[in-house]
Amino acid sequence: MSNGIWILHTQFGEIGTSSPSAGRSLTHECGHWFNLRHTWGNSNNPGLASNCNEDDLVSDTPLCLGSSGGCPVNSAGCGPIANVQNYMDYSLSCQSMFTQGQVQRMRQAATSSVGGRNNLWTPQNLLATGAGGTMYLCEAEFTADKRAICAGESIQFTDLSFNVVNGWNWSFPGGSPTTSTAQNPLVNYSTPGIYEVTLNATDGAASNSETKTAYIRVLPASGELPFLETFEGFTTLTNIAEWEVNNESGNGFQLETTTGHTGTKCAKVQNFDQQSGFTDELVGMPLDLSNVSQLTMSFRYAYKRRNTSDDDWLRVSVSNNCGDSWAVRKTLHGAQISSQVFSSSYKPTTQAEWITVHMTNITNTYWVDNFRYKFAFEGGNGNNIYLDNINVYAAAPSDNLIVGLDEPTALTEFTLFPNPADEELTVQFSLPNAQNLEIVIMDVSGKVLQSHSIQGNEGLNQVFVATEGFSSGLYFLEARGAGVSKSSNFVVR
């Protein structure tokens, strides 16, 4: 081969015989093939002082010494901060971009006959290599401007089929219209659910069909506060109404069924064995915040770094328009997310490993009836992360993370046992004086399942509650009286 790129298997991708630090080698070499120099100039020797007098012939890449691995983002050897994230640097750990000037230079190379790069597209060469001639329908394909919407909103679909397409037959279960022959139809969805979309494209002689299952998500009606998620009631996080999982290429948020802060379940990203650079999202259903005067969002996470140079990020974002746009309200990275290192695949084994985060910076701009929030975890050769006890409530921050209630302390020594429970649960508490109480049991959505009126005595009390008819999962129990209230959670096996 006289005009192409050779690359060793040890330098291709990030898995198998390669390594994360080699993951951008092919992109780097493609840059050279399209006439780009290294950012420090026309040599293979980064770090030399003389590189400040060299140039890569691109105006928007600053002069630099060049780096030899890592990600020295504060490097300023030639004056301005160096563009170490550039694919044409040797930074290895954080290569992620070309500049606009580099893009222009590569396009000029692709249109030039000097190096023969224009042979990629000239009709004469395409015909000579068997890639020209009569065009036929190859594939039906389409995209949508939004994949998740609130009920009543519309989605713009765009046809991407190729080649020479002149007919379209769309099917939109759950949408209006349910069918269309337009090339790029606008479809309204009014009923919550998860829907597929089918396009049959034709060139007049042949046709090709594409069906995308679970492609459109119409969100359920906005939930009420207080909201608490412990994941105990789920068997999966895939294609469920309550949570949207977005992961273009990574492992994605999954349901962990053997550990959690409360109970035995939580949400997890298996980040230890996935490539760096992927962002996995866990997006919550809409909540109605239109009547709150105070708001706290709290959650717990467990995480330990793989090493002190990994580059994992956890970001929490909020939306006041059902997810059309987002604003970051919490960012955890490096030592902020954890100061502890665990070189193997991490999994929490004690409650002490879980960290509680309280967010009070979700301002009244976001107190709307279609508020949404999401957790985005960007992996950078680090470790697994676990989320649990996601709580949104109209009160001051509370480490109890139960239902966000301000609970008086006159009812003391409050405990539930055995926990987890099988057929019976014991509620134990002390009162400063005799009074009537109501024992209320709720599921994770706040629905009342049982309510018992009792006479509480001064001092220590025990109440026995039958749980034999309950499904396995997490529940909440609240003891209410005149001026006293206390709540806690319990698990039924």
Image (cartoon, rainbow, N blue to C red):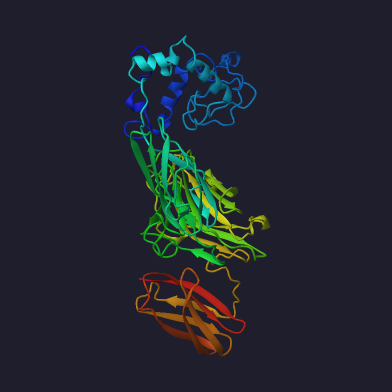
Q: Position of residue 491 (x, y in %)?
A: 41, 70
Q: Residue drawn at (57%, 27%), measured in percent from left and top?
A: 83
User: Taking 357 as reference, is 423 above or below it?
Assistant: below
Q: Which of 79 and 58 is in front in this view?
A: 58
Q: How many marks?
A: 0
Residue 363 horizontal/vertical position (percent): 66, 56
Establish if 335 lies above or below 372: above
- Res. 131 image quadrant: top left
Quadrant assignment, res 320: bottom right
Side of 60 where 191 appears, left or right: left
The x and y percentages for residue 493 are 35, 71
Residue beneath the point at 67% across and 55% down: 365
| Residue at (53% x, 26% y) in the render | 98
Q: Looking at the picture, how far across and down is residue 185, in whole percent?
A: 49, 44
Of the pair 394 and 73, the residue shown nearer to us = 394
Left or right: 233 in relation to 403: left
In which quadrant of the rendered image does the N terminus lie? Answer: top left
Please say if 377 is above or below 449.
above
Q: Residue at x 42, y 34 (%)?
A: 166
**Residue extending furthest toward the top:** 114
Q: Nearer the viewer, residue 481 or 75?
A: 481
